[in-house]
Structure formats: structure tokens, C-alpha cells
Image: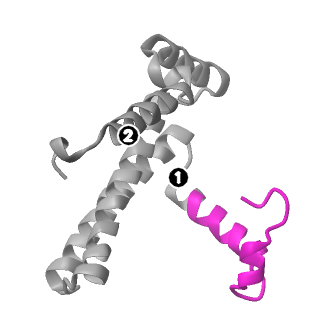
């Protein structure tokens, strides 16, 4: 739709929505100094390096999105998961691992620590193998 086809009601809706989004956005998300202060609080209260945590969080999300894009194109656009696509997926997983390693550095743990923690969590959650009821009805504190 070209902008000349948008009636005034649509323009008003978009402006009102944009104002609403701004109103419900945290100050740290809008104010560079507040954001900087929040980073200092993370560092001071946890001792964790916020710059590495942010790098890891954004990178894992971005690279995971690249991996998902390949699957999306196979599922919804008919692109084959041929050798080239599989190679591409493996490369994206390598990028995800790079960012996971960044997170491990920030959290002062190893990749092995994370794997063992995950095994312990899933064995406790699914002692007899996967169960959809347990998946949807977790015990308090089961994250």
C-alpha cells in the first residue's frame, strides 16, 4: 500500500501506537545514562561483565535466527535442505557456539558445566523420558 492510500484513521492509529510503545518502554531502554547506570548495577551487584553478557545474548539470538531462517525457507518456501543448506546450518551453529562460549566466559563456567547442568535438569524433569504433561506442568522453580 502506498502512503497516499493510507487514510487519516490509519495514520492516527500508527502515531497512537508509537506513543503507547514509548510510554511502556523502560527508561533504561530510552536514556543512554540510565542504560549505562543499569550496566554498572549489573557489574557491581553480580561481578559479571555486562558487555560480554550483552554480546552473548544478542549474538545467540541473531545467529539462532540465521539458523531458523534456513529451516523457515525449507518449510515454507520449498528450499531443499541439501548439502549446501546443511553446511550453512552447521556454520550458523558454530556462530551460536561462539556466542555461547562468550556467555560461559562471562559466567565463569565451562561449556561442560552447562552441558552437565542441562543433563541434570532434564533427567530431573523427565525421569522416564519426555512427557508432555511434565513439559507443560513444571514444578515450582523448574527453569
Q: CA distance from mark 2 to mark 1?
A: 55 Å
Residue drawn where x is 71% and y is 69% of the image:
120
123 w.r.t. 43: above or below: below
Q: Nearer the viewer, residue 3 or 58?
A: 3
Looking at the rendering, the stretch of residues picked out in magenta corresponds to: 114-143
Numbered label tally: 2
Q: Let me know if residue 83 is in the magenta part.
A: no
35 w.r.t. 76: above or below: above
Q: Quadrant of residue 143?
A: bottom right
Q: Which mark is residue 9?
A: 2
Q: Quadrant of residue 16?
A: top left
| Comparing labels 2 and 1, the label whose residue is closer to the camera | 2
Q: Which mark is residue 110?
A: 1
Q: Quadrant of residue 141?
A: bottom right
Q: Is residue 33 left or right of residue 38?
A: left
**Which element is circle 1 on?**
loop
Q: Is residue 137 left or right of residue 53?
A: right
- Residue lying farthest to the right in this orientation: 140
* Label 1 neighbour load within 10 Å: few <14, some 14-19, many 20+: some
Q: Is residue 139 left or right of residue 84?
A: right
Q: How is the image coloured?
A: one colour
62 w.r.t. 22: above or below: below
Residue drawn where x is 63% and y is 66% of the image:
118
How far across and how far down the image is residue 113, in percent?
Answer: 59, 57
- Residue lying farthest to the top in this orientation: 33
Q: Nearer the viewer, residue 23 or 65?
A: 23
Amino acid at each position: 500500500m502506498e502512503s497516499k492510500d493510507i487514510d487519516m484513521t490509519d495514520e492516527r492509529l500508527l502515531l497512537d501506537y508509537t506513543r503507547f510503545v514509548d510510554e511502556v518502554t523502560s527508561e533504561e531502554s530510552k536514556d543512554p545514562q540510565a542504560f549505562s547506570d543499569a550496566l554498572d548495577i549489573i557489574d557491581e551487584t553480580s561481578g559479571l561483565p555486562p558487555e560480554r553478557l550483552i554480546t552473548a545474548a544478542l549474538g545467540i539470538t541473531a545467529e539462532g535466527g540465521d539458523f531458523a531462517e534456513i529451516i523457515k525457507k525449507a518449510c515454507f518456501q520449498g528450499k531443499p535442505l541439501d548439502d549446501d543448506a546443511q553446511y550453512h546450518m552447521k556454520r550458523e551453529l558454530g556462530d551460536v557456539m561462539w556466542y555461547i562460549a562468550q556467555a560461559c566466559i562471562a559466567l565463569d563456567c565451562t561449556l561442560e558445566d552447562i552441558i552437565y547442568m542441562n543433563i541434570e535438569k532434564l533427567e530431573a524433569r523427565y525421569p522416564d523420558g519426555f512427557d508432555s504433561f511434565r513439559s507443560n506442568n513444571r514444578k515450582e522453580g523448574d527453569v
